[in-house]
Image (cartoon, grey):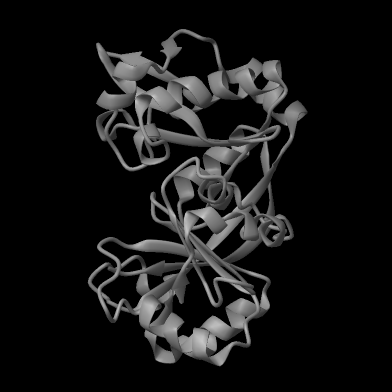
Amino acid sequence: MKLLDKSNYDKVIKPLSKVAVNHLFARSVVEKKVNGSIYVDNTETPGIFYIVHPYGMSLLFGNSDNADFNRQLIDYFLNTFKIRNKHEWLQAYPKEWNKKISALLGDNIVKFKDNQGNSENRKIEENTRVNFRFNKEKYLDFRNKNINKNYRIIRTDKELFEDMNGTVVPKSFWNNAEQFTGDGIGFSLIYDNQVASTAFSAFIHDHQLELGIETISSCRGKGFAEYTCSALIDYCIDNGFEPVWSCRFENTGSFVLAGKLGFEPTIYLPYYRLNN
């Protein structure tokens, strides 16, 4: 695995365009919108690509039959040389890679149903990643019946960008507040004089906008995510963007929320949690 210099990221554009699953996070790295990393088998004529987004997501694609690269993959997956200091979520394309990963890892991989998110188990946990398709009519029917706009929702500005804490927040996906407010978009719901929920563009490429959503723990279960996401989806509709949603199938809250908001599951694929 060789680290590709940023000056050569253009070599990844065409191969990445052939990946037929949601890969907007990887595009953000390749197009240098965030400071991620790209590993390849050969820096001059790469045929295998491993793209790591700083949030902790990665995409592996290309030729799966390079024995030398695959041996190095095992060390990376198992974090033998302590390259990772946090866990990472990996998806691979095409499906042949998932067979290869299973063969490479053997007993070091465990299904989610057998592990149930046990972070103490150092084995690599296989979850499921779901891609969705947006159904505008279904969304509008839900919004008209359920979203009454009683809550105060405001545009997410620089101050809110810095103040919002949690796992899925804008500062985990954008380099800084200036970049986010200039190139991105977000909406925050104010409740009890605090930011209760923020829906934001995790990635924007061409006509697609992928949603991120975070609600603080003390305000969950109140439907705030539905209200906040609806503001962002309305923005997408008004401005010609296709709303994009992806999540873990095991994340029941996100999966159910997606369905309420008009998103319909289209692709299910293995999603590996690599430990630090």
Image vertical order of residue 200 relative to residue 252, above or below:
above
Image vertical order of residue 86 relative to residue 122, above or below:
above
Q: Which residue occupies 44% across, 34% down? A: 213
Q: Which residue occupies 69% across, 35% down? A: 206
Task: Locate residue 233, reporting x and y percent.
Answer: 61, 24
Foreground of the two, 130 or 68:
68
* Quarter occupied by residue 129: bottom right
Task: Locate residue 240, reporting x and y percent.
Answer: 73, 22
Q: Is residue 59 left or right of residue 225?
A: right
Q: Does the rendering let one see residue 124?
A: yes
* Quarter occupied by residue 128: bottom right
Image vertical order of residue 29 relative to residue 18, above or below:
above
Task: Locate residue 258, reporting x and y percent.
Answer: 58, 39
Q: Is residue 215 left or right of residue 32?
A: left
Numbered-mark total: 0
Check the picture and name the quadrant holding the C terminus.
Answer: bottom left
Foreground of the two, 79 or 135:
79
Q: Which residue occupies 56% across, 76% down? A: 42
Foreground of the two, 222 or 88:
88
Q: Residue furthest right?
A: 137
Q: Does the rendering let one see residue 185?
A: no
Q: Is residue 244 left or right of residue 203?
A: right
Foreground of the two, 36 or 58:
36
Q: Is residue 197 left or right of residue 265?
A: left
Task: Locate residue 17, reporting x and y percent.
Answer: 71, 55
Q: Which residue occupies 46% across, 7% down? A: 150
